Image (cartoon, rainbow, N blue to C red):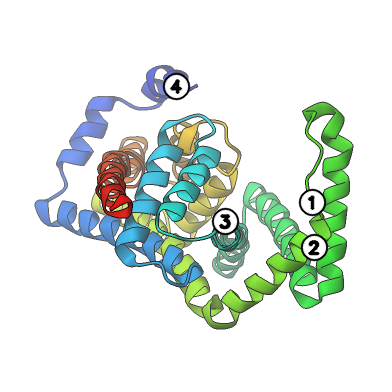
Amino acid sequence: MVLVIFVFFLPRVVDYEDVWSAIRAMTWLEVLTLAVLSVANQATYWLVEVSARPGLGYRQAMKITQTSTAVANTLPGGAALGAGLQTAMYLSYGFVPKDIAISLALTGAWNTFVKLAMPVVALLLLALSGGVGGALFASAMVGLVVLIGSILVLGIVLRSEHGAVAVGRAFGAVLSSLSPLTRRPPKGDWGASVSDFRRRTIEVLRTRWAPLTGATILSHVTLYLVLLLTLRHVGVGNEAVSWQEVLAAFSFVRLLSAIPITPGGVGVVELGLTATLVAAGGGEARVVAAVLVYRLLTFVLPIPIGAVSYFLWQHEVARRKPAEVN
């Protein structure tokens, strides 16, 4: 799919030489501002992680988020593998599995809530500017329905212990029905497990819900700003594609990329952003230039950074073991 998009599809839409010319036309100051904003966006993920896990330091959060992001961006099923690596790193820092599960669940849930809410916000902003599109309206409605359902389930779990036990038993029943296929029957009392999860989650959210919500929104907004600023720097002005339309394209593609078709949505994101932004009125060469620079900064560069953070973590663990033995 990636080869089809980059080797066969995009060259039929735009000449890569024109794309390169648009990229080279950026000044060093424009490149510097993009780099600074991209680094700031990466740092917001550390804030999200720290907000969801009391006792976690920023250096630890940096290693965890950058390493798991690199895995998610490079390997098939990378999101699941990244979560497994996050768990291993949390364990190495002394956190217990139950608290790790809450951290992963809260960051995942809050990111999903914002990802589902952004198409709705984009729809409202486009409606105010008179530019609502059918595809965006459909995606926004789907996102709104899923968002409301997710919040209701979380609300039931957190509101009462009885609701948490009921949800846990229902989930356990689903796993029991699948046990003939997996040949692994569910272990333990899911009602009691979800009840304990509820108690621990409430303890975290009582003091952390505000910074967690703020950090999560900030991470998504700064990612959108990287795309918006890149478009402006390559010459796609607001008169060609408004900031509301950029937000709509960004939100729609982010919702689409939640389906794990390729690692990190590579190829799918580029194609989706190019199609929606060109349809909105942007020139092909400049839009493709902006999308490629945006993905270089937010998708490609975190991979080597994540590799470095992984080796730093491995070195830290190896250095700690002799001290623990002594």
| Residue to which mark 1 is pinned | 188
Q: CA distance from mark 1 to mark 4?
A: 51 Å
Q: Is residue 199 left or right of residue 52?
A: right
Label 1 CA crowd tier, 10 Å (few <14, some 14–19, many 20+) = few
| Residue to which mark 4 is pinned | 9
Label 3 CA crowd tier, 10 Å (few <14, some 14–19, many 20+) = few
Q: Quadrant of residue 256?
A: top right
| Residue to which mark 3 is pinned | 97
Can residue 236 be seen here? The reply is: no
Along the polypeptide, which appears first: circle 3 or circle 1? 3
- Give amino acid for label 3: Pro
Q: Is residue 1 left or right of residue 116?
A: left
Q: Residue furthest left?
A: 28
Q: Position of residue 42 (x, y in %)?
A: 33, 56
Badge 1 element: loop
Which residue is depicted at the point 46% across and 47% down? Answer: 88
